[in-house]
Image: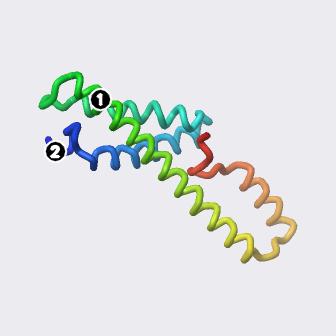
C-alpha cells in the first residue's frame, strides 16, 4: 500500500485517471456539468494523494502533486476520447445494418434517442 500511495508511483495516476473518467462521465451525463472543468477538478482531488507521501519534502510533494494531477487528467481525457471513438465506430456499423422500423417503433425510437446521452462525450 505504501508503494501505491507513493508520490513516485506511476500506477496510481493510471488508476486515478480511469476513476476520473468514470466520475466525470457520470457527472456530465447526469447533471450536465462541463466535462473539461469537472475532469480537471477531480484530477486535482485525486492528485492530492501525492501530498500524503511522508518520505519527501513539501516542495517535492507540491511538484509531484502538479505532475500527478496533470497525468491523471491526461489519462482521463485519453480514455474519454477512446470511448467516443469506439461509440462512433459502433454507431456507424449499426446504421449500416439497421432494419426498417414500423410507424410505432419509429416514435418509440425517437423518444428513446432524445432521452439518452452517451457516457463518453465531447469535453472540450
- The one nearer the camera, 53 or 28, is 53
Question: Residue at the location (31% across, 31% down)?
Answer: 65
Q: Secondary structure at mark 2?
A: helix
Which quadrant of the view contains residue 92?
A: bottom right
In the rendered view of the protein, which quadrant contains the N terminus? top left
Say the numbered circle drawn on residue 40: none
* Numbered-mark total: 2
Q: Residues within 10 Å of mark 2 (few under 14, many from 20)?
A: few
Measure how far apart labels 2 and 1 are at the Cα level: 18 Å
Question: Residue at the location (35% across, 44% down)?
Answer: 16
Question: Residue at the location (43% across, 42% down)?
Answer: 20
Which residue is tagged 1?
63
Q: Is residue 106 left or right of residue 60?
A: right
- The one nearer the camera, 93 or 124, is 124
Q: Secondary structure at mark 1?
A: helix
Residue 56 location (% of width, % of height): 15, 29
Which quadrant of the view contains residue 13?
A: top left
- Residue 32 vertical placement versus 57 (above, below): below
Residue located farthest toward the top when viewing the structure as drawn:
58
Which residue is tagged 2?
3
Amino acid at each position: 500500500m505504501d508503494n501505491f500511495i507513493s508520490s513516485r508511483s506511476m500506477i496510481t495516476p493510471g488508476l486515478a485517471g480511469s476513476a476520473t473518467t468514470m466520475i466525470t462521465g457520470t457527472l456530465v451525463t447526469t447533471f450536465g456539468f462541463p466535462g473539461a472543468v469537472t475532469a480537471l477538478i477531480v484530477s486535482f482531488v485525486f492528485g492530492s494523494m501525492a501530498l500524503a507521501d511522508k518520505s519527501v519534502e513539501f516542495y517535492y510533494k507540491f511538484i509531484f502533486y502538479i505532475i500527478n494531477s496533470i497525468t491523471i487528467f491526461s489519462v482521463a481525457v485519453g480514455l474519454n476520447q477512446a470511448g467516443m471513438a469506439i461509440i462512433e465506430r459502433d454507431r456507424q456499423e449499426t446504421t449500416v445494418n439497421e432494419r426498417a422500423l414500423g410507424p410505432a417503433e419509429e416514435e418509440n425510437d425517437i423518444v428513446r434517442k432524445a432521452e439518452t446521452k452517451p457516457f463518453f462525450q465531447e469535453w472540450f
